[in-house]
Image (cartoon, grey):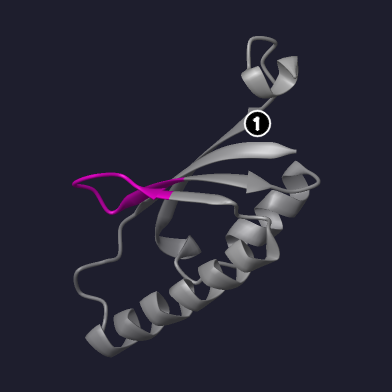
Amino acid sequence: MLFHVRMDVAIPHDLDPELRTEIVTTEKTRALELQRSGVWPHLWRVVGEYSNISIFDVGSGDELHDLLSSLPLFPYMTIKVTPLATHPSDLQVQR
């Protein structure tokens, strides 16, 4: 199943700088791991915001929730998930 996911990050300004660096570093490592595994095939930055738009390819909403909650920045995120379905006018579908 494909999901469109917007993640808006709001790390508290008073968070210990060393802890912030550690969280951001481990977040990047986890994100790269998930991309390499194929479950996170698309990741885009939202210009001018600490946000991203992603496409996830997972088996279920439960699997997506488990994956998202495994991200180190999860406690600092507002997440909006939209399940996707194929569109009959998509060129990929018409082939």
The single residue placed furthest to the bottom in the displayed view is 18
As for residue 45 lying within the magenta part, the answer is yes
Residue 17: percent from left, percent from top: 23, 84
- Image position of 80 with respect to 34: above or below: above
Tell me the amino acid under the disc marked 1.
Answer: Pro
The number of numbered badges drawn on the structure is 1
Q: Quick one: quadrant of the C terminus?
A: top right
Residue 45: percent from left, percent from top: 34, 50
Q: Nearer the viewer, residue 12 or 37?
A: 37
Side of 94 relative to 27 (left or right): right
As for residue 30 lying within the magenta part, the answer is no
Q: Quick one: quadrant of the N terminus?
A: top right
What range is drawn magenta here? Answer: 44-53
- Image position of 30 with respect to 94: above or below: below
What residue is disc 1 on? Answer: 83
Side of 23 relative to 18 (left or right): right
- Image position of 71 with respect to 16: above or below: above
